[in-house]
């Protein structure tokens, strides 16, 4: 049974998307919410948005890759940590520049893990705590042109599952939330990051001006609700994938590499790659 006495929540990446909505809804439920945003320019904006929503937030500048920001967070008495901060780098695994690859892992893996290490040790001393990792369906499956992002989320999956085993004797709850393709703008922005690459475009395998995120996208309301519920301790499942309609497909795709042959499809464009040529940005999934 979840510990209902835990009240102080830190939500990272709360300036937009899933983190923003989870912070607002947790505050509405009466939790003492610290909303971490990447840059100072977001602080006042989020404070105004909280007033408009009729909730109270403690808004803090918290770039998870910044050691000073992470150290500052150790003074907040965090009882529930929602590791939501993250970025998505789109592009082929053989095209994305080294700097962008490193930044993808710094923001999605290294920064959040180091932040969690300090806060988790405080939780261990209290013998209570909850850590929620916002992973992705991409942490369980892959899609063309999101491979580096997917790799970072596969790393998050490994960290979260291991952490759950390691901390259970200390009464620390660990869970993941795994959003699929949702229409928040995040997925489509991934397919624009190439515009700022510092590389030689002539050396790229693909022309990214012709590609889009390869899947239709869902209304994000179900993720807002699930993430809020998991953080609040209202859900007891370790892995929480949304939309639930994609669970069976996700499990099936995890089996494919066991059966795949090295020569399968050589010389022919994969259908999932073709989808990136044919899909239009921000295409909603059928209801």
Image (cartoon, rainbow, N blue to C red):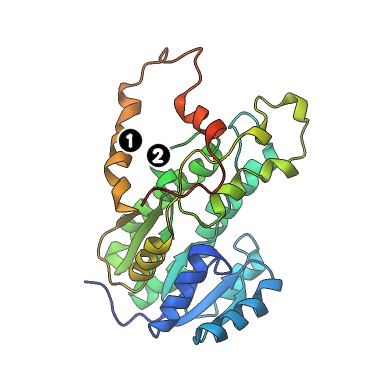
Secondary element type, mark 2: loop
Q: Nearer the viewer, residue 241 or 10?
A: 241
In the picture, measured across the screen, residue 12 lies left or right of residue 3, that is: right
Q: Is residue 216 visible?
A: yes
Q: Position of residue 253 (x, y in %)?
A: 33, 34
Task: Identify the mark at residue 141; answer none if there is no mark.
Answer: 2
Task: Check the picture and name the quadrant holding the N terminus.
Answer: bottom left
Q: Do the CB atoms of the residues marked 1 and 2 lie less than 8 Å apart?
A: yes
Q: Is residue 31 visible?
A: no
Secondary element type, mark 1: helix
Q: Position of residue 257 (x, y in %)?
A: 35, 27
Quadrant of the rendered structure where residue 5 is? bottom left
In the picture, measured across the screen, residue 166 lies left or right of residue 266, that is: left
Residue placed at 54% from the left, 75% from the top? 35
Residue that numbered label 1 is attached to: 254
Residue placed at 73% from the left, 42% from the top? 195
């Amino acid at each position: 049974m979840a510990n209902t006495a835990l009240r102080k929540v830190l939500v990272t990446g709360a300036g937009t998307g899933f983190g923003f909505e989870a912070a607002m809804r947790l505050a509405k439920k009466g939790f003492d919410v610290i909303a971490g945003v990447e840059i100072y320019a977001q602080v006042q904006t989020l404070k105004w948005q909280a007033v408009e929503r009729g909730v109270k937030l403690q808004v803090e500048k918290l770039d998870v890759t910044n050691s000073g920001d992470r150290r500052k967070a150790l003074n907040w008495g965090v009882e529930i940590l929602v590791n939501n901060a993250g970025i998505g780098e789109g592009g082929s695994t053989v095209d994305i520049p080294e700097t962008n690859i490193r930044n993808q892992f710094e923001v999605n893996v290294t920064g959040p893990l180091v932040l969690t290490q300090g806060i988790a040790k405080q939780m261990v001393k209290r013998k209570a705590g909850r850590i929620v990792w916002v992973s992705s369906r991409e942490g369980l499956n892959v899609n063309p042109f999101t491979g580096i992002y997917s790799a970072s989320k596969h790393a998050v999956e490994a960290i979260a599952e291991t952490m759950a085993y390691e901390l259970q004797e200390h009464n620390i709850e660990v869970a993941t939330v795994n959003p699929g393709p949702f229409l928040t703008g995040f997925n489509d922005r991934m397919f624009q990051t190439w515009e700022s690459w510092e590389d030689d475009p002539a050396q790229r395998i693909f022309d990214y001006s012709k590609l889009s995120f390869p899947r239709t996208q869902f209304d994000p309301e179900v993720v807002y609700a699930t993430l809020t519920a998991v953080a609040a301790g209202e859900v007891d499942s370790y892995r929480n994938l949304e939309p639930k309609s994609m669970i069976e497909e996700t499990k099936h795709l995890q089996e494919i590499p066991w059966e795949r042959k090295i020569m399968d499809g050589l010389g022919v464009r994969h259908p999932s790659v073709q989808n990136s040529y044919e899909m239009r940005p921000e295409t909603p999934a059928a209801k």
